[in-house]
């Protein structure tokens, strides 16, 4: 439903840029993912929600934190390497976006493990290599389960309303990809099992890059 609403509203709110239509993306401020179209001057007042600070190890045993994505657009998703259902499809689909943007150092991909007690840096490194992912800006992250789950549910709204009140005792499993702008605000939500939504994400990323330019 949120995708239908977004497409209907975004078709009405466009800005002219070099005679090309640039869609003004909505903001998502609550876990029900209601799209909010806000004028630039009102964003700080009306969109208080941002992604919280974090610090986790990646597949190279390097600490990745909010500092690594400061001023950059990023895409987040939540997987586990032993998943045999939707995770392989999600990784394959995210590669569609990655392959188009792998040379753009201002776009970061963060794949958080929801089984961090199993997915050590070395396991994540093997997973990344097995999937032939060479982009240094795509990080597979592991660390404290409670911190990852809290970040997923409270910051990224990974499971929408249903997950917002859950804690780390309840398993996290979601097909969502979350697009976050340079100011750490959520600007897009996509079904990671659907390849056609990756092309929508690519378009949305291009529009985000044009904001404030």
Image: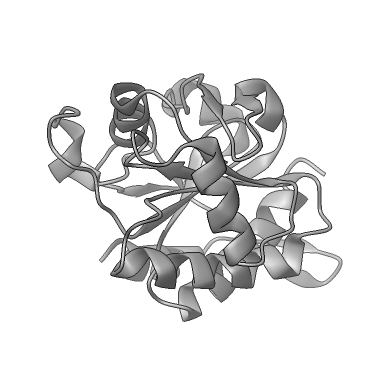
Q: Nearer the viewer, residue 184 or 4?
A: 184
Q: Quadrant of residue 112?
A: top left
Q: Is residue 165 above or below residue 111?
A: above
Residue drawn at x 76%, y 40% is 212
Residue drawn at x 38%, y 38% is 156
Q: Is residue 105 above or below residue 48?
A: below
Residue 196: image location, x then y, percent: 48, 80
Q: Is residue 28 above or below residue 202?
A: above
Residue 124: image location, x then y, percent: 52, 47
Residue 158: image location, x then y, percent: 32, 44
Q: Quadrant of residue 2?
A: bottom left
Q: Nearer the viewer, residue 72 or 117?
A: 117
Residue drawn at x 76%, y 52% is 210
- In what quadrant of the picture does the C terminus appear? top right
On the rendered structure, is 207 left or right of 185? right
Residue drawn at x 60%, y 40% is 59
On the rendered structure, is 164 left or right of 142? left
The reply to whether residue 90 is in sight is yes
Q: Nearer the viewer, residue 181 or 112?
A: 112
């Amino acid at each position: 439903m949120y995708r239908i609403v977004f497409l209907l509203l975004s078709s009405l709110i466009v800005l002219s840029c070099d005679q090309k239509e640039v869609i003004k993306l909505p903001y998502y401020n609550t876990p029900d993912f209601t799209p909010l179209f806000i004028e630039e001057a009102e964003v700080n007042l009306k969109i208080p929600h941002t992604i919280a600070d974090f610090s986790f190890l990646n597949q190279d045993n390097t600490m990745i934190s909010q500092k690594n994505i400061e001023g950059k657009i990023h895409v987040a998703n939540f997987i586990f390497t032993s998943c045999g259902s939707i995770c392989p499809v999600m990784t394959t689909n995210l590669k569609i976006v990655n392959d188009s943007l792998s040379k753009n150092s201002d776009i970061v991909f963060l794949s958080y493990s929801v089984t961090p007690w199993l997915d050590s840096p070395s396991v994540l490194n093997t997973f990344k290599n097995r999937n032939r992912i060479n982009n240094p800006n795509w990080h597979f992250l592991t660390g404290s389960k409670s911190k990852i789950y809290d970040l997923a549910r409270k910051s990224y709204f990974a499971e929408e309303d249903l997950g917002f009140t859950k804690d780390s005792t309840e398993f996290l499993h979601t097909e969502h990809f979350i697009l976050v702008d340079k100011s750490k605000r959520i600007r897009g939500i996509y079904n990671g099992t659907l390849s056609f939504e990756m092309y929508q994400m690519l378009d949305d990323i291009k529009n985000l890059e044009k904001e404030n330019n």
